[in-house]
Amino acid sequence: MMRSWEWVLCIALLAAPLQSDEIANTTGKGDWAADGANVGLWGGENWTWAVSVRPSIAYTLTSISLPLSLVNPPGVVNIVLAEDDHGFPGRLIEKFTIAVNDHEAALQKVTSIQHPQLAENTLYWVFVTAANPTRIYWHNTSDNPPPRGCKVALRENRSSWIVQHDQFRPPGLILSGEPFSTLKVARVTGQSYPRVLP
């Protein structure tokens, strides 16, 4: 049986707001490049792009930010966080649907509802796909070199993924979350009491 102070500690931890750190950031320091990876309809094909991330410690996801701009409306896209499947984007973890309305590159931020837990040193993917006939740019900064170990994947018309490695500058991505280690204090009775997810 838990003592009263243990219940108070668990309730306080579960009710505490998530404090965000950067899990991964593939953006540079300069201005956004004039163009970017074509997501959606381009050249008669429907393109999807993905960027890999590998957290150095365990995190609870809070948000994803991507530099996007509208080329051809209506601009509705899905932003997907996915597991890795033998080096390719795999099972969906959480999906967000947004409308991109600005023709100038700007960070589009989506806030996690499910707050999935991302394991330490585990590969994940963030990919963007068109939700309707549209075309957007997924930008990065013109000064940004390819991050070491970062993978970029693309596919056309929902065919198999094609993965490119360090030689390709990835689209910009900022993944934010709360270090999961701050929640381990709730294990005060030898049992685990993780944050309650919606």
Image (tube, rainbow, N blue to C red):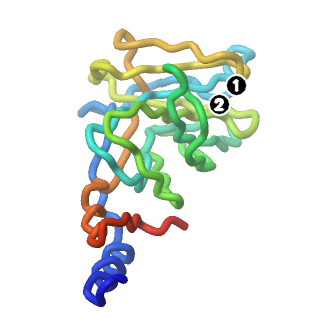
| Image quarter in which the N terminus is found | bottom left
Image-based side of 139 in relation to 137, left or right: left
Disc 1 marks which amino acid? Leu
Image quarter for residue 148? top left
Position of residue 23 measured from the top left corner of the image (x, y, whole percent): 31, 43
Q: Which mark is residue 41?
A: 1
Q: Which element is circle 2 on?
A: strand
Q: Which mark is residue 187?
A: none
Q: Residues within 10 Å of mark 1 (few under 14, many from 20)?
A: many
Residue at x 49%, y 35% (from the top left corner): 126
Lower sequence index among marks 2 and 1: 1
State whether residue 79 is above or below residue 59: above
Position of residue 88 measured from the top left corner of the image (x, y, whole percent): 53, 22
| Image quarter in which the C terminus is found | bottom right
State whether residue 19 is above or below residue 59: below
Per the model, the C-alpha gap separating discs 2 and 1 is 5 Å
Which sits in the foreground, 121 or 168?
Answer: 121
Disc 2 marks which amino acid? Arg
Position of residue 120 measured from the top left corner of the image (x, y, whole percent): 32, 40
Image quarter for residue 139? top left
Which sits in the foreground, 179 or 22?
Answer: 179
Which sits in the foreground, 119 or 73?
Answer: 119
Position of residue 98 measured from the top left corner of the image (x, y, whole percent): 60, 50
Q: Which element is circle 1 on?
A: strand
Q: Which residue is mark 2?
A: 135
Residue at x 52%, y 58% (from the top left corner): 114
